[in-house]
Image (spheres, helix red, strand yellow):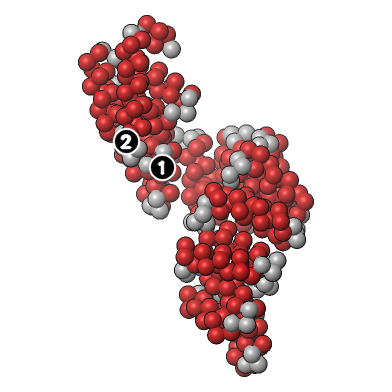
Amino acid sequence: MRDLIFMDLDLINKLVFDVVESVRKNNDGHCAALEFTVQFSRKNGISPDFLLNIARICDSKGMFREEYVFVKACALLGEGEQQIEAYFLSGVLAYFMGRKEAALQEFDEALKLDPGHVNSLCNQGIVLAELGKKVEAESRYRRALELDPGHVSTHCNYGNLFFGLGKMQEAEREFRTVLELDPGNANNRCNYSNLLVELGRKEEAEEHFRLVLEQVPEHVSANYNYANFLKEEGKVEEAEVHYKEVLKVSPGHISTLCNYGNLLSESGRAEEAAMHYRLILRLKPGDADARANYGQLLFELGRYQEAEIQYKKTLEIDPCHVPTLCKYGNLLKRLGMFRQAEAMYREALELDPEDVNTHYNYSLFLFKLERFDEAKEQYIKAMSSDSSPIFF
């Protein structure tokens, strides 16, 4: 910060103002701002350290795109360890701005300078996993752990990779390793809780959820996942408490709004549920699942015209949304539009011949029309599945 005091204030203001303006005008890229910063810094003898100080100020003000420009300029102008760390930080910033391919390139630059830079290997693994490049991600995690067997972040993210691949034993090994290395790592303990839920070890899962929330009461992911767990266990009031905790911290948390809305709907609190669905659709109009759930709620309230509007909008967003095709079939059946209803059920089964709910609801439809043999066939298909039908 002292470096900033001794620099020419007019020089500082020009550099920062021009970068801010360039970033504002070019939302899709930072090339012009970066080129200007590098040239301006060379011409005026501005050091990489000084650029990092400006970047820190940008970070404190939430100006992340501008921060990226100054950090990347430091990477281009710096040397040695400072240059490596600047490339790494550029990758982190690019990732959080949603520029995953750019993030990979930044981490690559850091690794060219230092092939043993463990943080770059770990973060590259994270990005590759999110891009679906699981094998490449695993190779980065393995290399990182060869270099630093106790690297907590790598073990945690390697566990997430295994969990996503369904390799539960390997995932548990990684999560337990982190618990030994860093017992206070709340994110890892939350991930381990989710794994235990999947393994059916419910008491252990609940114990770990509670430990996370003792450490970090406002932990969004732990509150959200614990609420889902409690909801599945039929502990509706407790689940509601934790959904509310998420929304205190993150009022626009879509998944929580949706699941909380579903809980309210299932509890008969229709108006509250409708409020949550409407909020989701204001925040994310293209959310097909939320729109379908809102349509179903309206159907249950007897507001058929409004329900049909939501079903139609859902199918505009996703013409292959099987649950909505089935629900729309139920609505058309209720309105006596049998030919159109059957077309909906058939279309749903063409898209997903194994869908239990469609088979079950189609069987009820056929029974109503006294087509008993066909109804029996659909009913048997519904009941022979491992899943239970949802009664609309």
- Residue tagged 1: 98
Task: Give residue 105's position: percent from left, percent from top.
Answer: 31, 39
Q: Is residue 372 above or below residue 210?
A: below
- Residue tagged 2: 26
* Extreme residue toward the top, this view: 6
**Residue nearer the viewer, 164 or 375:** 375
Task: Give residue 384's position: percent from left, percent from top.
Answer: 62, 80
- Residue 388 visible somewhere in the drawing: no
Residue drawn 43% across and 28% down?
A: 63
Q: Report crowding for label 1: few under 14, some 14 to 19, many 20 or more residues within 10 A (C-alpha).
A: few
Residue drawn 56% across and 64% down?
A: 310
- Residue 5 visible somewhere in the drawing: yes
Badge nearest the viewer, 1 or 2: 2
Residue drawn 61% across and 69% down?
A: 305
Q: Report crowding for label 2: few under 14, some 14 to 19, many 20 or more residues within 10 A (C-alpha).
A: few
Number of numbered discs on residues: 2
- The quadrant where residue 183 appears: top right
- The quadrant where residue 189 appears: top right
Residue drawn 22% across and 15% down?
A: 43
Image quadrant where one finds the C terminus = bottom right
Left or right: residue 63 versus residue 233 is left
The amino acid sitting under disc 1 is Gly
Task: Give residue 197's position: percent from left, percent from top.
Answer: 65, 54
Q: In this view, does 354 lie above or below 310?
A: below
SS under mark 2: loop
**Residue nearer the viewer, 180 or 354:** 354
Image quadrant where one finds the N terminus = top left
Task: Give residue 14's position: percent from left, percent from top.
Answer: 32, 17
Q: Distance between the residues labelled 1 and 2?
A: 16 Å
SS under mark 1: loop
**Residue nearer the viewer, 158 or 68:** 68
The amino acid sitting under disc 2 is Asn
